Image (spheres, helix red, strand yellow):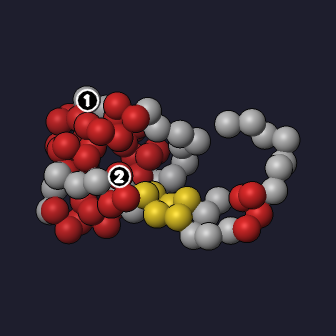
Amino acid sequence: MPIRVTLDQLIVRKGIKARDLAQQVGLSETQLSLFRSGKVKGIRFRTLARLCAALECRPRDLLDYDLDPADLVESGDED
């Protein structure tokens, strides 16, 4: 998938502990870890907003996208 979670880099730049961020945002450490590793299929906008507020950033600072023309081809999966 061409969408990459870049939260780890931001956590390092901000010098914050993932445990503290999870607590501040209201996530379990496991949930945050799964998001950080890119092993989730989605994230609620409310959770994304809380992460952005806690880290004083924008969604684009947490996610990145590598252009893939195949993303425009219908695969039968409806999102």
| Type of amino acid under label 1 | Gly
In the picture of the structure, the residue carrying the numbered disc 2 is 59
Quarter of the image for the C terminus: give it: top right
Marks 2 and 1, how far apart at CA: 18 Å
Disc 1 target residue: 26
Q: Position of residue 22 (x, y in %)?
A: 26, 39
Residue drawn at the location 17% of the way across and 36% of the way down: 24
Camera-nearest label, 2 or 1: 2
Q: Amino acid at mark 2?
A: Pro
Relative to 4, residue 26 above or below: above
Disc 2 secondary structure class? helix
The answer to whether residue 68 is above or below residue 37 is below
Give the left or right position of residue 50, taking residue 78 as reference: left
Examine the image and state in which quarter residue 20 appears.
top left
The residue carrying pointer 1 sits among few (fewer than 14), some (14 to 19) or many (20 or more) residues within 10 Å by Cα, namely some
The residue sitting at 75% across, 58% down in the picture is 72
> Which type of secondary structure does the marked residue at label 1 adopt?
loop
Quarter location, residue 48:
top left
